[in-house]
Image: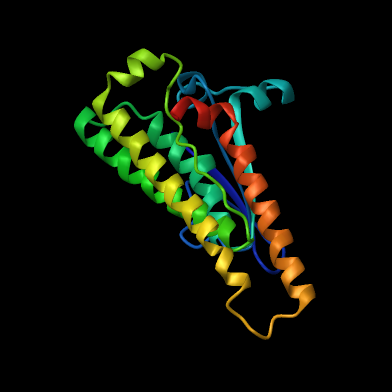
Amino acid sequence: ARVMTAITDADGELTLFIGLPENPGGQMIFFRPRGDEDKVDSPETPLTLTLGEARACVQYRYFRGDGMESLLRLMSSLYVPIFLNDNSWPDNMKKEFSGQLHKFMASLTETTFEAKGKTTLYIPDEDLSDSEAAAREKDLVQRLESTLIHWTRQIKDVVNRQDDGETTEDVGPLAEILFWRSRTINLGGISEQLSRPGVQHIV
């Protein structure tokens, strides 16, 4: 799929790229075809779209700044969908790469939100509409099992972290209250995530 990118630098100058810039920095918006790309992604057939049609046919995302959060947004909004919708890969190669990609995204998601004091469970974008058919796909089951193992390790880490509030002798009552408040919010967030349909389908 073709991608057009618009970025602004520190001086506010706007630059357009066909593709992705090597060092985006600053603020960036990308545009790519959505849905039936053959109708949009055709240089031989000029296409005029109304604003409503553009919203339906063109995917766009806005990114600001650098760091893990921008990388997560870029991966989940652009690169992962492009790969998953690309049917030109050999099946064996695509299955193997999908497994590694989901592992990377799980780690990236965990690291990004851990810096904010949150535990976020990565939900891989897999077709689980037919649970019986999905259960017969060995490679898919292995990828989902890997995701479950990652979730289990994340939750165990949070539960075992309860000693963090007890090991420091100089911690005052206010710090203790803040620790347990943060812990309650984090555990509540995990409980809410475990009840979501996407997680329930995998479990």
Is residue 113 visible in this depiction of the protein? yes
Q: Position of residue 182 (x, y in %)?
A: 70, 60
The C terminus sits in image quarter: top left
Q: Name the side, left or right, on which 201 lies relative to 8.
A: left
Q: Please, is residue 137 above or below residue 66 in the view?
A: above
User: What residue is at 58 percent from the left and 77 percent from the top?
Assistant: 167
Give the answer, above or below, for where 199 lies relative to 177: above
Q: Is residue 69 left or right of residue 42?
A: right
The residue shown at (74%, 60%) is 181
Q: Residue 40's x, y, as percent?
A: 52, 24
- Quick one: which residue is furthest to the bottom in this view? 170
Q: Quadrant of residue 58?
A: top right
Name, please, the residue furthest toward the right. 174
Q: Position of residue 45 (x, y in %)?
A: 50, 21
Q: Can you tell which quarter of the image residue 142 is in?
A: top left
- Looking at the image, can residue 18 be seen? no
Q: Is residue 137 above or below residue 194?
A: above
Q: Quadrant of residue 93?
A: top left
Coloration mode? rainbow
Q: Is residue 113 left or right of residue 137?
A: right
Name the residue located 61 percent from the left edge and 81 percent from the top edge: 168
The residue closer to the viewer here, 54 or 73, is: 73
Q: Nearer the viewer, residue 132 or 185?
A: 185
Name the residue at 32% across, 20% down: 135
- Find residue 88 and report its horizontal and vertical position in percent: 28, 28
